[in-house]
């Protein structure tokens, strides 16, 4: 006897030929109407058993707080020119903002979100190299602008 998702006999027929499947189900899944929808009897309600995967407020609050603190630490020394310590404070703010961005990306990835243009995790699709090149160029431009701005403080 071969192992598989269903127990079958030698000729591919189910072993329990006398047992009838539930109404509305075929051996390969639910029966669909001509327009592709599943026909649900009026007395039954379909409920998703798994909760939706989304970011909750308790997950977002510390990420947003760290990002706000980092961006303020980065912006104020650059805007008001606060002496010799301004460059160090701005770089620390930039570091905190980068940490918040990474933390947010990992939290979003954990609940199943992806970057626009990239395939979802586990789909088996390869990402397009042009989209990846665009993201890398954008990140490099932002880092270069931030470093140039902080370097002008000295």
Image (cartoon, rainbow, N blue to C red):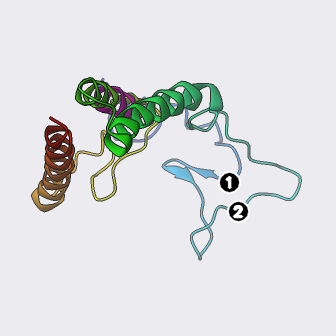
State left or right for residue 46 relative to residue 130: right
Residue at 64 percent across and 34 percent down: it is 51
Q: Disc 1 and disc 2: Cα gap in Å? A: 8 Å
Screen quadrant of the C terminus: top left
Q: Which residue is mark 1?
A: 24
Which SS type dominates the magenta stretch?
helix
Please, which residue is most extreme toward the bottom here? 35
Screen quadrant of the N terminus: top left
- Residue 9 visible? The answer is no
Counting from the top left corner in percent of width and height, residue 143 is at 18, 43
Q: Nearer the viewer, residue 51 or 109?
A: 109
**Tag 1, which secondary structure?**
loop
Residue at 31 percent across and 41 percent down: it is 78
Q: Residue 8 bears which disc, if any?
A: none
**Tag 2, which secondary structure?**
loop
The answer to whether residue 49 is magenta is no
Q: Which residues are magenta?
A: 94-101
Counting from the top left corner in percent of width and height, residue 2 is at 28, 26
Please, which residue is most extreme toward the front here? 83
Counting from the top left corner in percent of width and height, residue 96 is at 35, 26
State left or right for residue 54 relative to residue 40: left
Q: Nearer the viewer, residue 148 or 3?
A: 148
Q: Which residue is mark 2?
A: 39
Q: Tell me whether the residue at label 1 lies in contact with that at label 2, contact meaning CB atoms closer than 8 angstroms.
A: yes
Q: Nearer the viewer, residue 139 or 118?
A: 139
Local crowd at mark 2 within 10 Å, few (<14), some, or many (≥20)?
few
Please, which residue is most extreme toward the right here? 43
Closer to the observer: label 1 or label 2?
2
- Residue 94 visible? The answer is yes
Local crowd at mark 1 within 10 Å, few (<14), some, or many (≥20)?
few
Say which label, 1 or 2, has the lower sequence index: 1
């Amino acid at each position: 006897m071969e192992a598989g998702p269903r127990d079958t006999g030698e000729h591919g027929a189910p072993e329990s030929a006398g047992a009838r499947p539930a109404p509305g189900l075929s051996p390969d899944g639910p029966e669909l109407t001509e327009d592709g929808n599943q026909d649900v009897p009026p007395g039954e309600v379909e409920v998703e058993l798994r909760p939706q995967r989304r970011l909750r407020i308790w997950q977002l609050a510390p990420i947003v707080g760290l990002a706000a603190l980092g961006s303020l630490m980065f912006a104020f020394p650059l805007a008001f020119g606060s002496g010799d310590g301004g460059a160090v404070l701005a770089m620390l703010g930039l570091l905190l903002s980068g940490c918040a961005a990474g933390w947010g990306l990992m939290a979003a990835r954990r609940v199943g979100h992806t970057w626009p243009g990239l395939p979802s995790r586990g789909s088996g699709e390869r990402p397009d190299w042009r989209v990846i090149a665009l993201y890398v160029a954008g990140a490099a431009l932002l880092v270069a602008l931030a470093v140039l701005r902080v370097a002008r403080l000295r």
